[in-house]
Image (cartoon, rainbow, N blue to C red):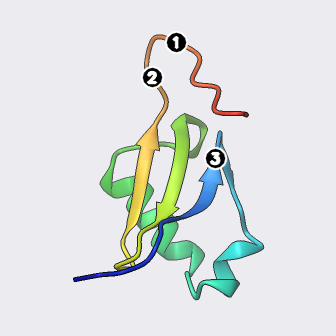
Amino acid sequence: MVVGRAVLIGRNDEIFHDLLPKHHVPLADVERSLRKEDCDLKDMRCAFLEADGQISILQKSKGGNADMSG
């Protein structure tokens, strides 16, 4: 059983580069996850570092504005 919380490492087209070293995540791993999900950075809504070390990518809706501010 994995215990912990997911960490937001990117939102709305932006990767939070300052958080990557803190959590020992190479930028290449984030880029690989984007490719795996067939998601361009401009189409990324959120990127999470999961408690098990995996990176989850959520894409913006194709037809609407996916503003996650607030």
Q: Quadrant of residue 19?
A: bottom right
Residue at image location 39% in from the left, 58% down from the top: 56
Q: Quadrant of the N terminus?
A: bottom left
Residue 11 badge: 3
- Label 3 secondary element: strand
Residue at image location 63% in from the left, 33% down from the top: 68
How many angstroms separate mark 3 from mark 1 (CA)?
Answer: 16 Å
Report which residue position mark 1 lands on. Answer: 64
Residue at the farthest left position = 1
Q: Is residue 29 above or below residue 12?
A: below
Residue at image location 65% in from the left, 39% down from the top: 12
Q: Is residue 65 above or below residue 36?
A: above
User: If you read the primary sequence from the N terminus, does the residue marked by circle 2 or circle 3 appear first?
Assistant: 3
Front residue (pair 5, 25): 5
Residue 57, how many percent across, how many down? Answer: 43, 51
Q: Is residue 4 above or below residue 47?
A: below
Residue at the farthest right position = 18
The three-letter amino acid code for the residue at tag 2 is: Ser
Residue 61 badge: 2
How many angstroms separate mark 2 from mark 1 (CA)?
Answer: 6 Å
